[in-house]
Amino acid sequence: MNERARLLLDHLSDVHAETWTVLSSLRPEDLEMELYVEGETGWRVMDAVAHLADAERGLLGQIRRLVAGQPTLPDNFDLNRWNRGAVRKRAGQSLQALLDELRSGHEDAIAFLATVAESDFDRVGRHASGEMLTTEGYFRRMGDHRRTHVADISRALAKARGKDH
C-alpha cells in the first residue's frame, strides 16, 4: 500500500472507530429524535443513520467510477432528491440492518482503497455536491461526511439527555 493510501486508511479507520462508538450505542428512543428540520420536513436520528449507510456506498461507487475513468455521476444528478429517496427506501430497515450496511460499506471502502494506484489519487471527478474532488478528496470526504453527521447526532443526544436529568 502506498503512503497516500496508508494515510487515507488511517483517516477512515479513525473516523469509523470514533463514530462507531456513538452509532452502536443508539437506543430505540434516540432514533425518533428530531435532528434536522427543513421547512415542514426534517430528519430524525434514524434518517441520518440511513443517509450515512447510503452515502458511503454512493461515494464508493463514485470513487470506483472515477478510478475507472468514467463519469462519477449523471449530468442531471440531484443530491437532495437522491438523499430523500435513499432515506425513504431504508425507512423500514432496523437500526441493526443500517449499522450492518454501514460497517460493510466501510470494509468495502477500505478494501478498494488498498487497490488504488498512486497515480489514481489525483484523478478528478464531480462530487454529488457539484464540487470537483480528486480520488483522495473523495476518500477524505467519506470520512468527514460521516464525522459531521455523527457529531450532529452526538450533540442532539447530549441535549436531549441533558433535559432528561
Image (spheres, rainbow, N blue to C red):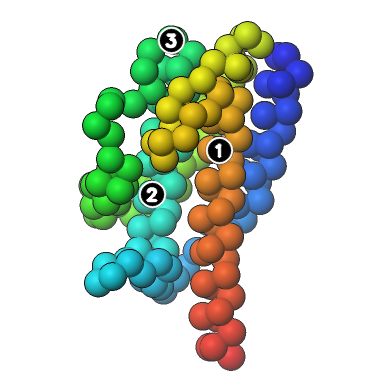
Identify the residue under disc 3. Answer: 69
Instruction: Identify whether 37 is placed above or below 86.
Output: below
Nearer-the-camera pick, 27 or 37:
37
- Corner quadrant of residue 150: bottom right
Q: Reading the chain from its start, which is encountered first: label 2 or label 1?
A: 2
Residue 76 visible in the displayed image: yes
The image shows residue 62 at horizontal and vertical percentages of 42, 25
Instruction: Identify whether 30 is placed above or below 107.
Output: below
Q: Is residue 13 left or right of residue 39?
A: right
Q: Label 2 amino acid?
A: His
Circle nearer the viewer, 2 or 1: 1
Give neighbour class at mark 2: few <14, some 14-19, many 20+ (Cα, 10 Å).
many
Q: Is residue 1 left or right of residue 101?
A: right
Q: Is residue 139 left or right of residue 77?
A: right
The image shows residue 122 at horizontal and vertical percentages of 60, 17
Real-space Cα separation, disc 3 to disc 2, in angstroms:
27 Å
Identify the residue under disc 2. Answer: 51
The image shows residue 152 at horizontal and vertical percentages of 53, 63
Q: Is residue 96 left or right of residue 91?
A: right
Task: Label 3, secondary structure: give it.
Answer: loop
The image shows residue 139 at horizontal and vertical percentages of 57, 30
Q: Reading the chain from its start, which is encountered first: label 3 or label 2?
A: 2
Q: Reading the chain from its start, which is encountered first: label 1 or label 3?
A: 3
Real-space Cα separation, disc 1 to disc 3, in angstroms:
19 Å
Identify the residue under disc 1. Answer: 141
The residue sitting at 27% across, 51% down in the picture is 84
The residue sitting at 43% across, 27% down in the picture is 126
Instruction: Identify whether 33 is placed above or below 94.
Output: below
Residue at the bottom extreme, as displayed = 165
